[in-house]
Amino acid sequence: MARQTGRGSPRWVKWSVIVVGVLVLIVVVLQLTGLGGQHGPGQHLPGSQVQPSVGVGHR
């Protein structure tokens, strides 16, 4: 019997896919359960109670 030289993807590719899959699963679970907190692009934007800025020279 001949020995097969190609056995699919290299080990590092398989482990990279597993690690990325686990990280994606964690993010999805945190988003669905709400345990991740209130995150998003609007978190760092000023709220609706922004004070108007007064420039120098306005009287």
Image (cartoon, helix red, strand yellow):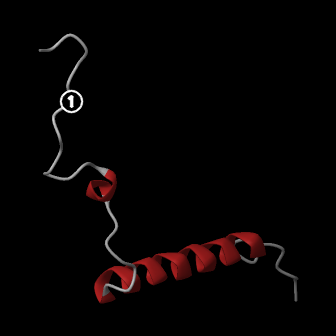
Residue 36 placed where, x, y %? 40, 79
Q: In this view, does 47 lie to the left or right of 7?
A: left
Q: Which residue occupies the extreme top position in the image?
A: 57
Count of all numbered marks drawn on residues in the image? 1
Looking at the rendered image, the quarter that the C terminus falls into is top left
Q: Where is residue 35 in the image (x, y as percent from the top left)?
A: 38, 86
Image point 26% across, 56% down: which residue? 42
Residue ID at (32%, 61%) = 40
Q: Is residue 17 depicted above or below 35 in this figure? A: above
Q: Identify the residue under disc 1.
A: 53
Q: In the image, 30: left or right of 16?
A: left
In the displayed structure, 39 sits above or below 24; it is above
Q: Quadrant of residue 28?
A: bottom left
Helix, strand or loop for disc 1: loop
Determine whether 46 is above or below 22 in the image. above
Q: Residue furthest front?
A: 59
Instruction: Choose between 4 and 17: the one closer to the eye.
Output: 17
